[in-house]
Amino acid sequence: DSGVTQTPKHLITATGQRVTLRCSPRSGDLSVYWYQQSLDQGLQFLIQYYNGEERAKGNILERFSAQQFPDLHSELNLSSLELGDSALYFCASSVTGTPNQPQHFGDGTRLSIL
Amino acid sequence: AQSVTQPDIHITVSEGASLELRCNYSYGATPYLFWYVQSPGQGLQLLLKYFSGDTLVQGIKGFEAEFKRSQSSFNLRKPSVHWSDAAEYFCAVDESGGSYIPTFGRGTSLIVHP
């Protein structure tokens, strides 16, 4: 058990809809990362937050947004969903958010777009 | 733009045999380099990382990797594979120079025969 909690574990929705994925980091970790893993795109880093502020941005679409709240949990919002957004979305957390800090990964949310 | 190549989609080895997983990257300077492992249904776990210094890096679970600048490679090795090592392995490169914006390879699936 990594200590990182992601909800829901599975999500099925339709094209054009909007969903919110939630991540609770490991106790004591201030930084949260979001990743997308799909058959087409492979594994991609989306975005990182540290103590409520955006720290780094990767290949995140404009239809996607994220935030980290004062209690340090994070949400990834996906809107105007397309079939290609079907993927496994991972959240990870680390203490300080620097590259030399190990990240602890959740088990992911599997999003299926019908 | 940086890219990461893992030439082997699948590798099959016998338990107890040695293992080498290949990773090549395209980037002019020395990036940060990572190897992650993903067991079925789980998130990623960091095996090891290279930032600078000694080019032979030791990681968890008996893995090591060697950075070879002349070959732009960061191959992962293990002298004796265990059945529990069967998983997906990802190489990642980060050229952001202090942030964390990794690019992942497509992964190598390791199959271990008894």
Image: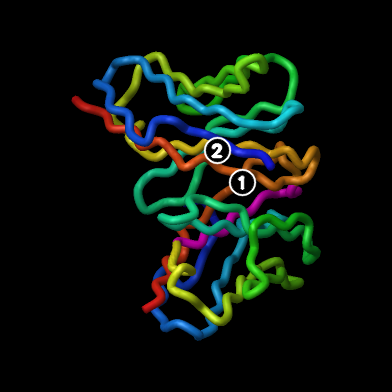
The segment highlighted magenta reads A88-97
Q: Is residue B33 magenta?
A: no
Identity, as a three-letter code, of the amino acid under mark 1: Gln
Q: Residue at x 60, y 17 (%)?
A: B71
Q: Secondary structure at mark 1?
A: loop
Q: Residue at x 49, y 54 (%)?
A: A41
Which image quadrant is residue A64 in?
Answer: bottom right
Chain of the residue where label 1 is placed in the rendered structure: A
The image shows residue B5 at horizontal and vertical percentages of: 52, 34
Q: Which residue is mark 1?
A: A103
Evaluate if marks 1 and 2 touch, with contact meaning CB atoms under 8 Å apart: yes
Q: Quadrant of the C terminus of chain B?
A: top left
Q: Main secondary structure of the magenta part?
A: strand
The image shows residue A10 at horizontal and vertical percentages of: 40, 71
The image shows residue A102 at horizontal and vertical percentages of: 63, 41
Crowd tier of the residue under label 1, counting other residues whose Cα lies within 10 Å: few below 14, some 14–19, many 20 or above? many
Q: Which residue is mark 2?
A: B46
